[in-house]
Image (cartoon, helix red, strand yellow):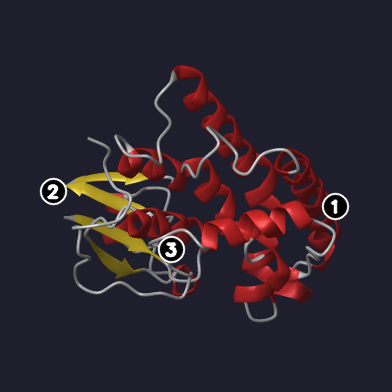
Amino acid sequence: MYKLYSMQRSGNSYKVRLALALLNAPYRAIEIDILRGESRTPDFLAMNPSGQVPLLEVAEGRYLAESNAILWYVAGGTSLAPETRIERAEALQWMFFEQHALEPNIGAAYFWLALVKGGRDLQTHALEDWMERGYAALQVMENHLKTHEYFATGQLTVADIALYGYTHVADRCDYDLTTFPAIRAWLRRIEQTPGFVAMDWRPGAEVDDSAGIAADA
């Protein structure tokens, strides 16, 4: 069984929990509060020198970091992972987009405005740039979703999960999604997927793996 070190309110951590839930994959969740320095302890840094969550223990003593890398690992061989060369590349292009255009702006705004007490005052100088660049990223997504239901292969994949992680909390950190109807419809499609769980959902000790949209035979 996987061990997942994650923070409940982290969008990057939530991506992995959401994928595991959609796959109905068993795992043990271990809460790491980065705001309390729990990812900077010697024990944690020995597992992940970057001091970040999520972190997945895939075998005893073997760890995988970076949320999108973890998504590819857990989704391999399932309907969430595209099979053909071009579809894999299309999914990856959107996951790279998420990490360089969406997460550094909407993700940063969410962290400082929604999670850190007094964060707005501490980051006043950065907020304008986050808003401008975050809205630009949302417009790119909106333009794609005007003619596509999902971001790759015409169905839900790891690319959608990666982008959903912070897009769905954009309204908690000053972004107005009312002018992005295609994004709002896409968010609803994901939330209506069997097995979907919200960010505040907490798994039990084990998750039954007898159903869901897991591995394709």
Q: Secondary structure at mark 2?
A: loop
Name the residue at 50% across, 64% down: 10
Per the rendering, the mark at residue 132 is: 1
In the figure, is residue 52 to the left or right of 205?
A: right
Q: Amino acid at mark 2?
A: Glu
Q: Secondary structure at mark 3?
A: loop
- Around disc 2, counting alpha carbons within 10 Å, would you say few (fewer than 14), some (14 to 19), or many (20 or more)? few
Q: Amino acid at mark 3?
A: Phe
Name the residue at 29% across, 68% down: 30
Single out the residue that lies furthest toward the left. 60
**Counting residues from the N terminus, which is met first, the one under dot 2 or under dot 1?**
2
Residue 111 lies in quadrant: bottom right
Provide the residue designation for mark 3: 196
Foreground label between 3 and 1: 3
Mark pair 3, 1: CA separation:
31 Å
Per the rendering, the mark at residue 60 is: 2
Give the x, y percent position of residue 133: 80, 48
Give the x, y percent position of residue 21: 35, 60
Foreground label between 2 and 3: 3
Picture layout, residue 151 above or below residue 2: above
In the figure, is residue 141 to the left or right of 14?
A: right
In the figure, is residue 183 to the left or right of 70?
A: right
Q: Amino acid at mark 1?
A: Glu
Q: How many numbered badges does the structure rendering display? A: 3
Give the quarter of the figure containing the N terminus: bottom left
Give the x, y percent position of residue 104: 66, 50
**Counting residues from the N terminus, which is met first, the one under dot 2 or under dot 3?**
2
Mark pair 2, 1: CA separation:
43 Å
